[in-house]
Image: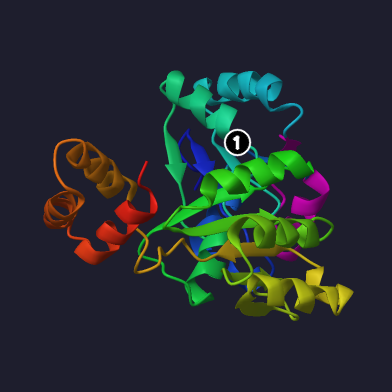
Amino acid sequence: MSHAAALYIVPTPIGNLNDISQRALETLQQVDFIACEDTRHTAKLLSHYQISTPTWALHDHNEQYKSEQLVTRLLAGQAIALVSDAGTPLISDPGYHLVNSCRDAGIQVIALPGPCAAITALSAAGLPTDRFAFEGFLPAKDKARLDKLESLKDEARTLVFYESPRRLLDSVRALVEVMGEERRLVVARELTKTFESIHSLPAAEMLEWLMGDDNRSRGEIVLMVAGHRPDADELPAEALRTLGLLRAELPLKKAAALTAEIHGVKKNALYKYGLEHTA
């Protein structure tokens, strides 16, 4: 039984071949062909499960050009599966242009659930998961990396990055510089594989630990950063703005009391701030 004409987004294992779903295997078996990030890499998976469906390379450098050809085939009634080298396609992997083109052309896009390194790592990290931000790969160049982290320094959500072995130390050094030595980091590597490890430390200690053994930076890596938690005495910018406006018309003591009531912060902390920042 062949699949109906559509683009199927098929997640593949991030390490352990047993993590592929039965539905994913059936889809890869029954579609007309498979668009994949690297045909040689996907060939290993297909060979393991004795799947002989033809493959076609779709990667960052040819995606826009190949998407047009794939859309033509889909409109002609073919069923196509999209896979990346590992995990869920489009999550820091190719596929956006193709999916967007399919949507514009009215082609059905069917996403299968399955492995994703970011979610797998986050679920075992011990960091808050009620709110998180996936940021993909940090920039490779030092200044761009620092600028990116500076923009995220006050982010309250848990931050999730993908990182390469050769850049992990540079990224952790940048995190120490921008977010401080005590910011909690979690490095998850080789998830679902034989040498899986998930290590949690304050940023400065994490840098020292990684520098102690090159093996600790090897493999596929998810780097997670605890969200910013303001100190108990840290005053919100909105409260300081209110205090400044009220001080123009009222004595400091009264302005601090009203600001505290409006924003639910400590009156004494506002009063102390006002004394220290008297023009």
* Foreground pick, 143 / 72: 143
Q: How many marks?
A: 1
Q: Is residue 183 above or below residue 139?
A: below
In this picture, residue 26 sits left or right of residue 65: left
Q: Residue at x 56, y 60 (%)?
A: 118
Q: Residue furthest right?
A: 214
Give the quadrant of residue 108. Answer: top left
Q: Amino acid at mark 1?
A: Gly
Magenta segment range?
Answer: 39-59
* Residue at the image point whose x is 52% and y is 31% from the top: 99
Q: Which class describes the residues within 10 Å of circle 1: few (<14), some (14-19), or many (20+)?
A: many
Residue 270 lies left or right of residue 132; in this view the side is left
Q: Dividing the image into 4 quarters, which one contains the C terminus?
A: top left
Residue 116 shows in this picture: no
Q: Residue at x 64, y 69 (%)?
A: 181
Q: Quadrant of residue 87?
A: bottom right
* Camera-nearest residue between 9 and 279: 279
Q: Position of residue 161 (x, y in %)?
A: 61, 55
Mark 1 highlights which residue? Answer: 95
On the image, the x and y values in percent for residue 243 come to 23, 45
- Give the image's coloring scheme: rainbow
Residue 3 visible? The answer is: yes
Element assignment for label 1: loop
* Front-lying residue, 13 or 118: 118
- Name the residue: 26% across, 49% down: 239
Q: Position of residue 44 (x, y in %)?
A: 79, 58
* Residue 253 in magenta stretch: no
Which quadrant holds residue 46? bottom right
Q: Is residue 40 magenta?
A: yes
